[in-house]
Image (tube, helix red, strand yellow):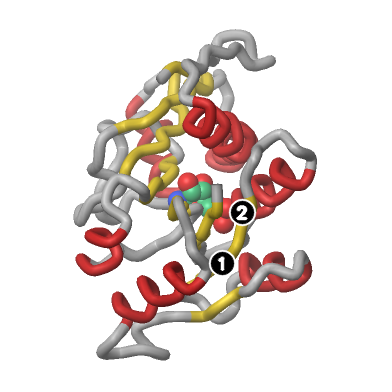
Amino acid sequence: MRLGVLASGSGTNLQAIIDACKRGELNADVCVVISNNSGSRALERAQSEGIPAYHISAVTHPHTLDDEICRTLEAYDVDLVLLAGYMRLLGTETLGRYDGRVLNSHPALLPKFGGKGMYGSNVHRAVLASGETVTGVTIHYVDEQYDHGDTLAQCEVPVLPGDTLETLEERVKERERVFWAETLHMLATQSRLTTRDDTGGAHCSR
Ligand code: GRF
């Protein structure tokens, strides 16, 4: 699989996907990385791995953003587009061109705790406020709405007594980094995925 990854922030999920490819756990290559944020660590991570990296945003391409993203993905012959911490909606051209081949990860069990404004710490703050004892990660197909397309895979992560925003966010992100590779591997092999992680209760299912 030739992967194109879009990321806005620190890029730890991107790094985990690159590392899984390098270790041979995933039969795929990250061929291009795009960020809307010129200061994103994701761009630096890509560059230091020798992966082409592009800053493409509404500032760099105010009238042709969607077209430029689509064109860049096509230039690298990408099979699958991953939104790994990408903070923007994709345009109709890119979504049409890669219909059914764009995935996003969300750090909660959608449809709960998703939608506009539900990103980063906001998600985990809402989970803690709700009193839920289980949260998780959702990898889903992307459509024109935030956190809305069909779910491909979900993975549960416990909310533990005494959790703070920081401890919960870190536990979910740690699981999310591994879950990307597991889910992509499942997709590549079309096998079902059922695993149990070392937190004692979490499981993944397709
Ligand atoms: C991830 O938790 C992702 O689900 C959310 O933003 C975070 C990105 O983290 N949308 P990173 O940039 O991969 O470190």
The residue sitting at 45% across, 75% down in the picture is 72
Q: Secondary structure at mark 1?
A: strand
Quadrant placement of the C terminus? top left
Q: Which of the pair 98/40 is nearer the observer?
A: 98
Figure check: 53 above or below 199:
below
The residue sitting at 27% across, 52% down in the picture is 99
- List the residue tagged with mark 2: 14
Asked if marks 2 and 1 touch (Cβ < 8 Å), the reply is yes
Q: Which of the pair 38/68 is nearer the observer?
A: 68
The amino acid pointed to by label 1 is Val
Residue 110 placement, left or right of 37: left
Cα–Cα gap, marks 2 and 1:
9 Å
Figure check: 8 above or below 102:
below
Give the mark, 2 or 1, whose residue is nearer the N terminus: 2
Figure check: 206 above or below 68:
above
Q: Is residue 172 visible?
A: no
The label number, if any, that marks residue 33 in the structure image: 1
Q: Secondary structure at mark 2?
A: helix
The residue sitting at 28% across, 61% down in the picture is 97
The amino acid pointed to by label 2 is Leu
